[in-house]
Image: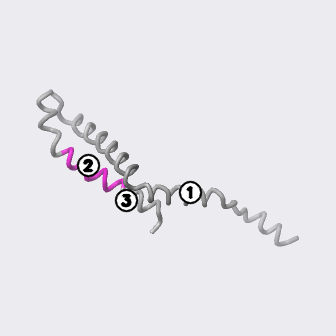
Amino acid sequence: MNPWIQYSLVRLGIFGAAFALLFLVLPAPLESIGVVGFAVIVIAAVIAAVVALTVSYIFFGRLRDAVAADLAERRAKPAVDPDAAAEDAAS
């Protein structure tokens, strides 16, 4: 499986799990200080994003390195221009 897809799915999975947990747990404490509605969703999303970033940075370095290596490999390959290839073949 492509390292980009793996790393993205891991990050999305961590974010989804953290968001679901926070969405269920946060409303009661936040309502006591007057925060309700959409603000709870935004706060849960921001905290879940930070949690996903931190967990993936600490525990999934190998996947992150694979994505970086794939990016470096793609960057190192020269782009093949069809016109230039045709000219080279003709001469």
Which residue appears at 66% of the width and 58% of the height? 76
Q: Is residue 69 rendered to the left or right of residue 86?
A: left
Instruction: Indicate which disc residue 9 carries.
Output: 3
**First of labels 2, 3 by sequence position:** 3
C-beta proximity under 8 Å, tags 2 and 3: no
Secondary structure, mark 1, is helix
Q: Magenta-highlighted stretch: main secondary structure?
A: helix
Q: Is residue 53 rendered to the left or right of residue 91?
A: left
Which residue appears at 82% of the width and 72% of the height? 89
Q: Quadrant of residue 62?
A: bottom left
Q: Quadrant of residue 31?
A: top left
Instruction: Indicate which disc residue 21 carries.
Output: none
Secondary structure, mark 2, is helix
Instruction: Indicate which disc residue 71 carries.
Output: 1
Within 10 Å of disc 1 (Cα), the crowding (few <14, some 14-19, many 20+) is: few
Q: Which residue is mark 2?
A: 18
> Rounded to the nearest whole Å, what is the CA distance between mark 2 and mark 3?
14 Å
State the image coordinates of residue 45 (x, y, percent, origin top left).
29, 42
> Rounded to the nearest whole Å, what is the CA distance between mark 1 and mark 2?
28 Å
Q: Is residue 49 above or below residue 66?
A: above
Region in magenta: 11-23
In the rendered image, the quadrant that contains the C terminus is: bottom right
The amino acid on which the numbered mark 1 sits, given as a three-letter code, is Leu
